[in-house]
Image (cartoon, helix red, strand yellow):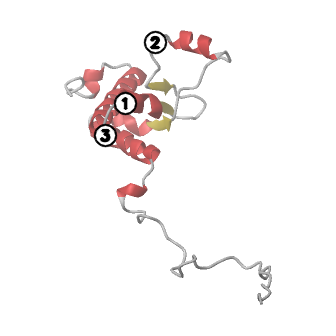
Amino acid sequence: MDKPVSPRSADPRPRRRDRHGRGMRGPVAPPQVPLSASRSEVFMDLVQDAVERIERRVPQLADIEFLVLDVPRLDRPSDTADAADSWGDSVPLGGTIAAREGKPARVVVYRRPVEIRTKNREERAILVHEVVVEQVAELLGLSPESIDPRYGED
């Protein structure tokens, strides 16, 4: 004779342990380990390293704000074919925004175009440094070699 199966109680309590009784899992790596850094955080560190590398030579960097954006913004609404034509065959890797109305001048580095053009972290660090040097030079009206004498040697 079959025993009647009692229906599961509709318990609204959340489970505190998994089915093996080990408890909820924590993060895979603690926050101080590089595994937990996102790609955008790693990229921002590369930009910061590039800025620190040239700030001894250029005291005006204190007046410049550095930003990292994922991709360049389109200047005008258009379809994708027109957008590609407006940039030609190349997407910008960086840009500048002049100081105005109490806002500091800004240098912008675009993360995705830089990542696409590089194969590894070393190449990415070199390209980020070159982009930062070029944009600072453009903003200050100087040559890139005056910002960093080793510009273009890497």
Describe residue 77's horizontal placement relative to residue 51 as left or right: right
| Residue 16 showing in the rendered view | yes
Relative to residue 92, is residue 10 drawn left or right?
right
- CA–CA distance between discs 1 and 2? 21 Å
Q: Are marks 1 and 2 in contact (CB under 8 Å)?
A: no
Picture quarter with the C terminus = top left
Name the element at disc 3. Answer: helix
| Residue at (57% x, 28% y) in the render | 100
Residue 132's label in the rendered image is: 1
Neighbor class of circle 2 (other Cα within 10 Å; few <14, some 14-19, many 20+) is: few
Residue 18, percent across and down?
A: 57, 76
Q: Where is residue 64 drawn, in percent x and y?
A: 44, 35
Number of numbered discs on residues: 3
Viewer-side residue, 17 vs 26:
17
**Is label 3 or label 1 in front?**
3
Report which residue position mark 3 lands on: 121
- Dot 3 surroundings within 10 Å: few (below 14), some, or many (20 or more)? few
Circle nearer the viewer, 1 or 2 = 2
In percent of width and height, residue 103 lies at: 56, 35
Disc 1 marks a residue whose amino acid type is: Val
Q: Earlier in the sequence, mark 3 or mark 1?
A: 3
Q: Secondary structure at mark 2?
A: loop
The amino acid pointed to by label 3 is Arg
Gap between marks 3 and 1 measured at Cα: 16 Å
**Disc 2: which residue:** 89
* Amino acid type of the residue that numbered disc 2 sits on in the rendered structure: Asp
Q: Nearer the viewer, residue 120 or 77?
A: 120
Which badge, 2 or 3, is on the more N-terminal residue?
Answer: 2
Looking at the rendering, which quadrant does residue 77 occupy?
Answer: top right
